[in-house]
Each structure stands twice: as structure tokens, then as C-alpha cells.
Amino acid sequence: MSADVTSQRRSTGLVVVSSVLVLLWVVVASFPFLWTLWGSFKVESDFFSRTDWTNALNGTRTTIETGGPFTTNGYSGAWIDQDFWRNAMNTAIVVTSTVVISLTLGTLGGYALARSGFRYAFWLLMIALVFRAMPHITLVSGYLLPFFEWNLWGHLPTTIIVLVAINQPFTLWMLHSFFLQIPKDLDESAMVDGCNRFEAFWRVIVPVMWPGVITTGLFSFLLAYNDFTVTALLLSRENQTMVPRIVSFLGSTFEAGNVMFAVAAVVSITAPLFVLILFFQRQIVSGLTAGAVKG
């Protein structure tokens, strides 16, 4: 009886400790975004006050300059005065194109490699893994010279091509692992019923591994959405996406910037990520679980 009580106490203690650690992690992880969100409605002299950090809470200078403790000047200045909406459109074009192309090629290639009985499939995946492990700056530098010579630098399609090239090995590996979990009997049964290879793939296999497609697509989205190196080097100022445009809000040694435009823009591009994760959380968990279980 005493052993059961001791075991129950240990279990309760473990739950309490685990809960405290999780709560601590949530606070630490969410604090930077929440603080930035709060500060985006202040003026720079409050949010970056050196005399009294509580000004960021009280909005002392914000009240004096704008007539209230909160202001949306950062958002209107970034989105309207600085045309940040154009950068958002460029980001939408680049991200959507990268995800669609990467998933299309990755799904077809992953299925072919998963169903191939030849040894070259393994070596192709190894080559893709090595390519994926290379630093992005190494890959981008190889494209700069031909893009300049052919007058292709600064345009969205060239950036999409490079992002697809960087992202493709990852999608190939992810989708290949998902296809391996699907029995070949499904393909064979569909072909016995009259489907050809592609029809069996499209009508039977793809619906089964749809959570894997969602999971891989989300990671592809994050890679293209958060990219700085490729977009900063390959896009002109007129065609910039959101991440490098935020950096330009900070200015330089030769040009004054507006920090609050950058703060408001950071909040603007981070908020959709939370919505996306919440919307696809079930598919993500299902996809990751399917890819981690063998058989």
C-alpha cells in the first residue's frame, strides 16, 4: 500500500515539475514576440527608452506625441508610406511558387524513388542530402555571375528558381520517407482495377499521404517565407520580399531609418505564422507521426 502511495507521489511530483518547465518555456519563448507586439504601438523614444524602461509600458512619450498611450503610426508608416504591401505581395508570389513547384517535383520524385528497386535511388538521395547541407551563400554565389551576365538578376522568377533548388532535396527526402510507409499493395490493387501507374499514384496514394504533403509544404513555406540570404542577394530593392525590406527600415550609416517601421513589420509578418500553425496543427502532427512510424 505504501509503495502505491509513494509511486503516486512521485508521479504527481513529476507532473508538477514537467508543468512548471513547460510553462517556463512558454513564457521565455513567447515573451520576445509579445514584447515586440506591445512595443509596435509605441513611439521609438518609449520603446527604446534608455532613461526609464517603464516608458515602454506607460507610453509616456507616446501620449505626448500622439495624444494617447497607443499609436498605429508604425504600421501605417510601414505599410502605406513605405509601400510594405508591395513587399508582402512579392513574398506571396515567391512563397506560393516555391511551395507549389517544390511539392510537385518532390511528390513525383519521392514516389518514384520510394517505388524504385534500383540502387541508384539511394545515391540520388545521398547527393540531395549533401546538396541540402551546403550553406545557402555557397549556392547563391554560383548563380550570381550567370544572372548578371544574362540580365536576370533582381527578378522574382530567378529567386524562385534558386529557392526551389535549395528546398528540393528537403522535400524529396521528406516525401520519400512518407511514401515508404505506404504499402505497395495499394498501388498494385489500383492497377489491377484498371488504373495505370500515374492514376494509381494520383487517386489512391496521394489522398492517403495527404498529411505528409501538408507537413512538407509547411516546412517549405517556412524556408521560403523566412529566407534572407537568397532574397537579399538576388532581388533588387523594387522587388524585395518582406524580410530584407525590414532590414532596410533600420537604415545604414549613410541613411537614416525608422526603427518603429521595422518593429511593426516584424509583428505583421510573424502573426500569420501563428495562424497557419493553428490552422494546420492536426495535419502537421498527423504527418510527423506518419513519417516517424515504420510499417
Image (cartoon, rainbow, N blue to C red):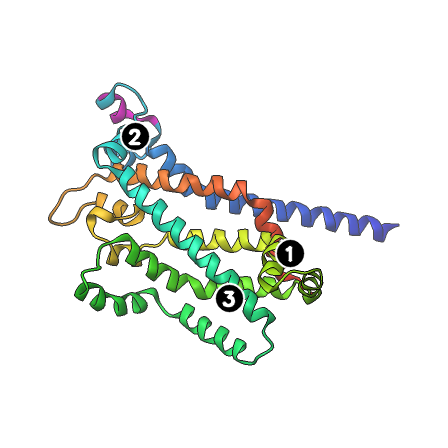
Q: Which label number is shown at residue 143?
A: none
Sequence order check, earlier mark of 2 and 3 = 2
Give, as a three-letter code, the residue at label 3.
Gly
Residue at which label 1 appears: 204
Residue 26 in sight from this viewpoint:
yes
Whether the residues at callouts 3 and 1 have beta carbons within 8 Å, the answer is no
Q: Secondary structure at mark 2?
A: loop
Characterize the magenta stretch by its predominant secondary structure.
Answer: helix
State the residue position of label 2: 42
- Badge 1 or badge 2: first in the primary sequence: 2
* Dot in front, 3 or 1: 1
State the extent of the magenta-drawn residues as a range: 58-64
Relative image position of residue 196 (x, y in whole percent): 62, 63
| Label 3 Cα neighbours within 10 Å, binned few <14 / some 14-19 / many ≥20 | some
Q: Earlier in the sequence, mark 3 or mark 1?
A: 3
Hey, which residue is sitting farthest bottom in the picture? 119
Q: Who's the residue at 58% across and 69% down the image? A: 114
Asked if residue 63 is among those painted magenta in the image, a careful observer would answer yes
C-alpha span from label 3 to label 1: 17 Å
Query: Residue, x 49% and y 53% (percent of image)?
Result: 217
Q: Mark 1 belongs to which amino acid?
A: Val
